[in-house]
Image: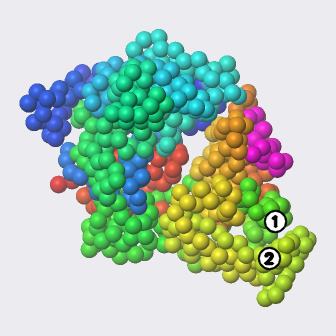
Amino acid sequence: MIKNLALLVLAPVLACVPVLAAAQAKYVEPPAFEAEVKAGTLPPVAKRLPENPLVAKLPAGAKPGQYGGSLNMLIGRSRDVRMLVVYGYARLVGYDQNFKITPDILESIDVKDERVFTMKLRKGHRWSDGQPFTSDDFRYFWEDVANNKDLSPTGPPSDLLVNGEAPKVEYPDKQTVRYSWSKPNPDFLPRMAGASPLFIFRPAQYLKQFHIKYNKKAGDADTGGGSKRGWAANHNREDNMYQYDNPKLPTLQPWINTSKPPADRFVAARNPYFHRVDTEGRQLPYIDRVVLSVAEGKLIPAKTGAGESDLQARDIQFNNFTFLKKGEKTNNYSTFLWKTARGSHFALFPNLNVSDPVWKPILRDARFRHALSLAIDRAQVNQVLYFGLANESNDTVVEQSPLYKKDYQTRWAKYDKKAAAKLLDEMGLKTGAGGVRRLPDGRPMEIIVETAGESTEQTDVLEMIRETWREVGIKLFPKPTQREVLRNRVFSGEALISVWTGIENGLANADVSPEELAPTSQQQLQWPKFGQFYETSGKAGETPDIAEAAELLKLNGAWRNAASREERTKIWHRMLEIHAEQQFVIGVVNGVGQPVVVRNTLRNVPEKGVYNWDPGAFFGIYRPDTFWFSK
C-alpha cells in the first residue's frame, strides 16, 4: 500500500469524511437558488449534490456559517483571476490544514506501492453546468488531449511520465479511474493537490464541440478554428481550467468566474453543483460571490488599509504591517500575521545560462557566488526591515523541517567582506578606478539585479545589499520590470541576476519530492535552460554542464526510485548540502511574517496560519468555501 509518501493520510484506502447521518441528510438549499428551484430552472439541492458529498471538517474554534454576501478582494493584474482556482482549492485530492493529503473531489483513492492509483468518483457529482462528472472526463483528457499531437505536441505532461514511461490508464466504470506505472510515482498525488494542480480530467461534454474528432466543423473559420490545425488553437483557448478566463468552461470549483477578460473587475458566482456540505447539511460555499478588483499592485496595501478588501494578503508585504494595524479600528478589519514556509523570503538567482560570454564563467564560478553571499549583511537587513523577527538564512529548509541543519542555514552566509574580497582577488577580478572591480574584458563590474517590480520591499533589500557589495568592489543596480518580462529576460540569457522567493516548501521532509532543488523546470531562474532540457526530454534547452547541477538531477531521479525512507533522507541531505556549498540561489532571510487583513465580520479565517504557495495554495487549505459573513 502507500509507503513513505509525504504529507499523506496513510491507510489502505484514502476515503472521504463519512456522509451525513440519516437524521442530517436533509440538505439545506442556499437562498440564492431558491427562486430558480421554485421556477423549475434548477434542480433542488438534494439532486444537485453527489450521493455522498464531502462533509467539510471545520477547524477548532470555527463554526457552521450562514449564507450570503460578497467577498471583495484585490488583484494586481487581470491574469490573477486564476486565484479563484487557487483559493477555491477543489482538487481530486488536497492538503488539509496539517498538510496531509486527503480525498476531496474523489470519494476515495486506493494506492498500491506508489505505482497503482485507483480513484473512485462520487456518484452523482456534476460539473457547474449540470453535466455528469464521470470517468469519461478522464478518458477525454488522456486520449483526446494529452495524447493528441495537435493539442499536446510534446506528448502527455512530464508529471505523468516516470523515467519516460507513460501511465497505463483504465476506466473500469463511470465512477472508477486507474493510473498505473511499473515504477513508483511518488509525485502523482502531491501534483494533483498542488496550488497550480495537475488536472487529469476535462469537461468532455463542453470541449468536444471544439475537437475535430467529435466535430468535423471545428476547423471551419466561422467556429474560430480557421483550418484543420487551427482547431487546436481554438480548443486550447477554450480549455483553460487553471487560467480561469473562460466563463463558459464548466468547473468544479466553489465559485464560477462570470467575467471575460480583459476586465478590471471579475465576479464569481456560487457553483450550484459544488460537492461539499457542512455538518448541518448546508451546501457550500456560504458566500454567494467573490469579487476580484484589479488595482495597481503598489496601491493594494493602501487600498486594503482604506477598507476596500474583505480578505487580503496578496501584494501585501511585511513592511505594510504597521500601517495596516493603524487603520484597523477606522475601517473595521483585523491584521493577522501568518507564518511563511519558504526557504528564503528574498533570494538572488545568478543566471547560470546567461548569454554574455564574459559574465557566464564568472557566475558559474562558485567562488564568485560565495563572495556575493559573504558580502550581504543579513543581520542588518533583518533588523532594519523585519525588526529582527526574521531568520538570517541561506535558501534552505526552515527550522520546523525534519531535514533542517544549522550548517545548511549558515554556510557562506555570515557577513565577512574581507573573505569576500579575498575570493574575488583569487579569481583575478582586480580593482580599478573608483574602487570598482573589472571584468576580464575591462568593463567595470556592474551587476543589474532584476525584479518583477511588484514589491518595494525587494528594492529596499537590494539597496542594503548594494551598500555592502560596493565595499568589495561590485556595483549593484536594481531594475524593476514586469513578471513576464523578467522571466523572458532570464530565459533569453539577458538578465545576470534576478530576485524571487526561495524554496516553496521549506517544511519538506524526506518523502516530499526534492525536484525543486534540481534543474527540472524552465521556470527556475538560476538555470532555466537546464530545466527546459529536462522538461522537454532533451528536445530543447541546454544539457546541464555544471557537475553539481548534473548531480542534483541524478539525485532527483534516485529519490524517485528509492526503496526506503532512509535512502530518501540521505538523498535529500546530499542535495541540501550541494545547495549550501554551491550557493546556486543566494538566500537572505526566511520566516518573515505575512500580514493577512480580514474584515471583522468575516468568520472562520484562522488568526494563526501558514501562508504558502505549495503546499498550501495560500488561503486554499483553510477552505474559503467555509468562510462566512456575520450579519
The residue at 78%/46% (across/down) is 544
The residue at 69%/58% (across/down) is 493
Please tell me the numbered disc located at residue 625.
Answer: none
- Label 1 vs label 2: CA separation? 10 Å
Q: Is residue 272 above or below residue 293?
A: above
Q: Kindly identify which residue carries mark 1.
A: 358
Q: Is residue 94 magenta?
A: no
**Image coordinates for residue 399, horizontal then vertical, percent:** 64, 55
Name the quadrant containing residue 534: top right
Name the quadrant containing residue 608: bottom left
Q: Is residue 308 above or below residue 110?
A: below
Which sits in the foreground, 472 or 110?
472
Residue furthest toward the left? 39
**Image coordinates for residue 180, horizontal then vertical, percent:** 59, 19
Circle 2 packing at 10 Å, graded few (<14), some (14-19), many (20+), is few
Mark 2 or mark 1, which is nearer the start of the sequence? 1
Q: Kindly identify which residue carries mark 2.
A: 443
Label 2 near label 1: C-beta < 8 Å? yes
Amino acid type for the residue under numbered disc 2: Arg
Dot 2: what SS? loop
Per the rendered image, the range of residues in magenta is 542-558
